[in-house]
Amino acid sequence: MTAVRDTVSLPGQVWGLAAADPTGPLYVTSYAGRGPSAHNLNTTMLTAVDLTGATIWQRSFNGHPFPPRVDTDGTVWVAHHDGGSPPGFTFTAVGPDGTVVRSVTPQQEPPEHLGAVVRMPDGFCAVWLPTAPRRRSNNGVARLARHGDTGDTIWSTPLPLDTISYPGVVEAGDATGWQVRPKSAWVPSTLQVAHWQPLLVAGDRILVEISDGSSGIGICTFVETATGQVISATEPSPYHHKAIAGPGRFLVGAQGYGAFTSTLYDHDGPVQTWPSHGMMLIDQHGTIRGPESENRLPSRSRFRVLNPDGSMRDGSPLTGYYTTYPALDAHGTTVFWRDGALLAVDADHHQRELFTMTDDRAVMSRVLLLDHGTVAFALDNELLIFHDTGLAPLAHGPWPCADGNIQGNPVSLYTTS
């Protein structure tokens, strides 16, 4: 089968893709334009696109793009600078017709910088960094805060990242030799949120990762949703992709510096570890599957299923490296873009190509699986929409696609009762 493709050119590199409903429209956040101009890099464009590829409306906001968070009624929340000096941050709601519905200014302390935010049923949960990215933090402490719908702070929890270490991290030697040598332990000079899935909410637990800006070594902290109380924290590691696995349950991957694992955590701590890391999906039966992701060429990655006993089932080898975070349909088929092809891997690990083209772009969004098997994702500044894929609707479960839902909001309202 060859899928039919529509292509939509966006103003600049895409940073987020979401929808309120499988029928669309798609909401895309991107830079305001191409090239490194100050305007392009400090302006967010929010674009609404229907499933035929037609642009419905666009709006612009101050600041570097954040992913859109969409309510089920079609309201899109955009985090952005407020235009002040120093800049504060505002959460603005845009209605389905493109009009601004309202804005919320959460309580914050300049020069704090917003690291990540998710939409909660009664407000927001946000990570605040002591300074803007790539600026020295002077031993500042990040914090996680729960904000109400008016921006008031319900609770605030410090997230210190003190002296850390990890085998395999190296540094340049001194001026007498400049040889590379192991970096035994250090205090981070810059703090950042994790590049992949920095903030997840699964019922009564929140998972948040803060990492060192120079090495990528970070710590995942588990926090009680209602009170902000810290429950536990992991040892420092090069954490990468994560997923919600159920009420208070998370899958945490580590990759780099010799690490290549995925660990399942529940309320009592680590449950199982597998010798694999990837962009994993989790269905309603708890089955974990997805394409492996390893910083290595030529590729050694495969499509994998992680069995409950710690063993793995091997799928087809995967060529190339850059991969969209996949989506899972109701029949157990995983769809993703890798090495110039739109691939579908069914429940029996049979792999087929839905579309191919010569393309080596490295900046990719997640995959959205929408109405009538429509597949959408972005490559750099282009939104690709594929029709006639033969795929079923998006599967049920805690993590059938990146962020756990098409709304782009990694919040599962599970309860443990």
Image: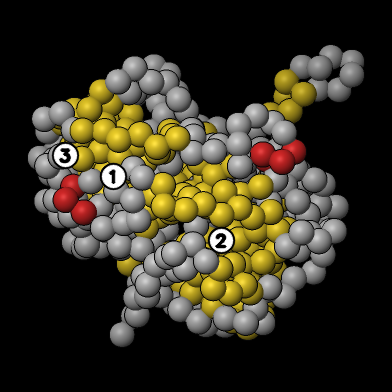
The percent coordinates of residue 382 (x first, y second) are 43, 34
- Gap in angstroms between the C-alphas marked 3 and 1: 15 Å
Q: Position of residue 407 (x, y in %)?
A: 39, 61
Label 2 environment density (alpha carbons within 10 Å; few <14, some 14–19, many ≥20)? many
Instruction: Say few, some or many: other residues with alpha carbon within 10 Å of mark 3 (under 14 / 14 to 19 / 20 or more).
Output: some
**Element at label 2:** strand
Q: Residue at x 67, y 39 (%)?
A: 40
Whether residue 402 is visible: no
Secondary structure at badge 1 equals: loop
Of pointers 2 and 3, the one earlier in the residue sequence: 2
Vertical comparison of 315 with 73: above or below? above
In-front residue for pair 180/77: 77
| CB within 8 Å, label 3 to label 1 | no
The residue that label 1 is drawn on is 52
Tell me what residue is drawn at x 64 percent, y 55 percent.
61
Query: Element under label 3?
Result: loop
Which residue has dot 2 on it? Answer: 78
Q: Quadrant of residue 341?
A: top left
What amino acid is labelled 1 in the image? Thr
Of callouts 3 and 1, which one flags the residue occurring earlier in the amino acid sequence?
Answer: 1
Question: Furthest-top residue in view?
Answer: 177
Q: Residues within 10 Å of mark 1 (few under 14, many from 20)?
A: some
Q: Is residue 23 left or right of residue 184?
A: left
**Three-letter code, disc 3:** Thr
Q: CA distance from mark 2 to mark 3?
A: 31 Å
Identify the mark at residue 389; answer none if there is no mark: 3
Q: Is residue 83 visible?
A: yes
Q: Earlier in the sequence, mark 1 or mark 2?
A: 1
